Image (cartoon, rainbow, N blue to C red):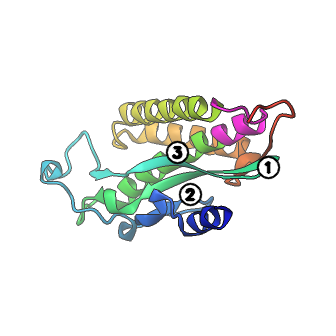
Amino acid sequence: MTLLMVSIHLFYTPVHAQLDTMHYQDGLKLEEKHFKAVTPNSALYAIHKDDLGGHISLDIVTEGRYYLDSANVFVYAVMYCDKSWILRNNIVIEEALEHELYHFKITEICARRYRKKLCDMMYIKGTFHEIECQIKSEHRELNKIYDLETQHGVNVSEQVRWQTIIDRQLSELQMYASPLVKLKYAKNRSR
């Protein structure tokens, strides 16, 4: 039975690893080649005053490795390249790529906040899901506000203001940049 469990563990591949993904890294620069999805017909309104013309598919992904007395939890900010698109032949392609990069940075901020919350606690059964739901909700809300206030990157002064805020927050959370969080089980936890 133990041999079977080990075999399953060795051959298990997380869903996000099966897709064309990219993990956030400090200093990352997005390029057209990272956006592999075909632009949907509904987006072919081309560029107008309310949008630079792109979509980035992002998520916060958690993986765990559990041992008798501890757990290693990995929290990643992930871009799904196959689900992300950018209008080609876009006269403001660099601005569009920059705007989408800051969506990715918002995702990393939320991943770092998640790692911080995990570091601040002992592993207690059931709390990961609550924290993950809270962080993902915050992630969606921050991205909505970012798009609303920057008008999807068109409002240059708001875009610059948001970039400053986002870069500052990433810097403040630098000690949580590593995806790995090591946790110890509480002594009195029931199995």
* Mark 1 residue type: Leu
Question: Which residue has dot 1 on it?
Answer: 68
* Label 2 or label 1, whichever comes before in sequence order: 2
Say which quadrant the C terminus sits in.
top right
- Residue 36 placement: quadrant: bottom left
Q: How far apart are the two marked residues, 1 and 3, measured between alpha carbons?
A: 31 Å
Of the numbered discs in the image, which one, if any, rests on residue 167?
Answer: none
> Residue at position x 40%, y 66% from top?
34
- Residue depicted at 37% across the width and 71% down the height: 33
Compute the Cα span from label 2 to label 1: 30 Å
Q: Quadrant of residue 189?
A: top right
Residue 45 position in % (x across, y down)? 13, 49
Q: What residue sits right under mark 3 in the picture?
A: 107
Instruction: Estimate how packed mark 2 is, as few (under 14), some (14 to 19) or many (20 or more) residues with alpha carbons within 10 Å.
Output: many
Among the two numbered marks 2 and 3 on one chain, the one whose residue lies closer to the N terminus: 2
Mark closer to the observer (2, 1): 1
Mark 2 in CB contact with mark 1 (< 8 angstroms): no
Give yes or no for contact between labels 2 and 3 (Cβ–Cβ under 8 Å): yes
Total numbered labels placed on residues in the image: 3
Question: Magenta segment, which residues?
Answer: 113-126
Mark 1 crowdedness (10 Å alpha carbons): few <14, some 14-19, many ≥20: few
Q: Inspect the magenta stretch and tell me whether residue 123 lies in it.
A: yes
Residue displayed at 27% across by 62% down: 37
